[in-house]
Amino acid sequence: MKHFLYLNWQSAKQALLKILRQPFGSLLTLLMLALALALPLSLYVAVNSVQDWVGKLTATPQISLFMELSAEEADLAAVQSTLKHHPKVQSFTFVSKTKALADMEQRNGLQGLGDGLEANPLPDAFVVTPKALEPRELEMLQKELSGLPMVEMAQFDAHWAKRLYGMVEMGKKLTWFLAAALGLALVLITHNAIRLQILARQDEIEVSKLIGAPDSFIRRPFLYHAMWQGVLAALLAWGLTSWLCAMANPAIQEFAMLYGERVELRFLQPLELLALIAISAALAMLGARLAADHHLRKVEPK
């Protein structure tokens, strides 16, 4: 076991040294791999930043329940009890008809308006904040709450919720599509790079096979070379994405402040960075393995 670990350690070290000894040629390959990773990574950061912002919005689609004018205290208590124990309701606020009229008078500068009215024309209302943002669930919740006793109308901005949800979902799907397409590109780029290395070392490989070296021994240096390419490319992609976030954040924050919001592109978390490095290394090694297996089957000692 120690000998096996030692051989792997030596192969990994030599592969890294080989990359460092050829900085110019290695940098070109690494830049291609990094760009293939940076595109979906940048979109991932943007979509997750928007999603984080959406989760913090104070303008979350709220359902307004307007009671009938003849609703009594018992009716209000029944609706309040239902909302309090409803599994899809995050919170709710009761707005009495008296408070609604006072707010309208203050907001429009119409103090004393209620004194000239025989009765308050505004209904009691409940402003409900749901737990889910998915439009279909909101519509189902709206229909359910509209059937509560003495509720005259239940309304919310369904079109706004659908548009917002649709934009986030489209961004997620586009991220996964780009990640799959450019992940395949990473495999192909690594496959081609390792294929060229194998062709350049064909005589050495034939000699190794002639003295009885197994395919796993011959394949190992190429796999570690690809692994280091994947790791370094992931770090370069992370650096490019972080630079783009730092450059774009001031403009995004300035634009968001016009609407009284605070939005910024967030940087990758440590676990996300580790996942990026692991995925990049695995894809690169997959390309190397495919190239090595394909060409080793063709290389026979003379």
Image (cartoon, rainbow, N blue to C red):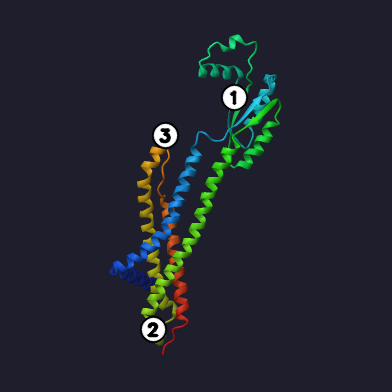
Judge left or right: residue 187 versus residue 166. Answer: left
Q: Residue at x 61, y 41 (%)?
A: 135
Judge left or right: residue 49 versus residue 98. Answer: left
Amino acid type of disc 3? Leu
Viewer-side residue, 103 vs 148: 103
Amino acid type of disc 1? Phe
Q: Which mark is residue 94?
A: 1
Q: Residues within 10 Å of mark 1 (few under 14, many from 20)?
A: some
292 is higher (above) or lower (below) than 212: above
Q: Residue at x 36, y 64 (%)?
A: 30
Residue to which mark 2 is pinned:
208
**Label whose residue precedes the other's in the sequence (2 or 3):** 2
Residue to which mark 3 is pinned:
258
Mark nearest the camera among 1 and 3 is: 3
Q: Tell me where residue 70 sits by quadrant.
A: top right
Q: Secondary structure at mark 3?
A: loop
**Label whose residue precedes the other's in the sequence (1 or 3):** 1
Q: Residue at x 41, y 46 (%)?
A: 266
149 is higher (above) or lower (below) than 7: above
**Label whose residue precedes the other's in the sequence (1 or 2):** 1
Q: CA distance from mark 1 to mark 2?
A: 81 Å
68 is higher (above) or lower (below) than 146: above
Residue 1 seen by the camera: no
Could you say where residue 276 lies in the image, as x and y percent from the top left?
Answer: 43, 57
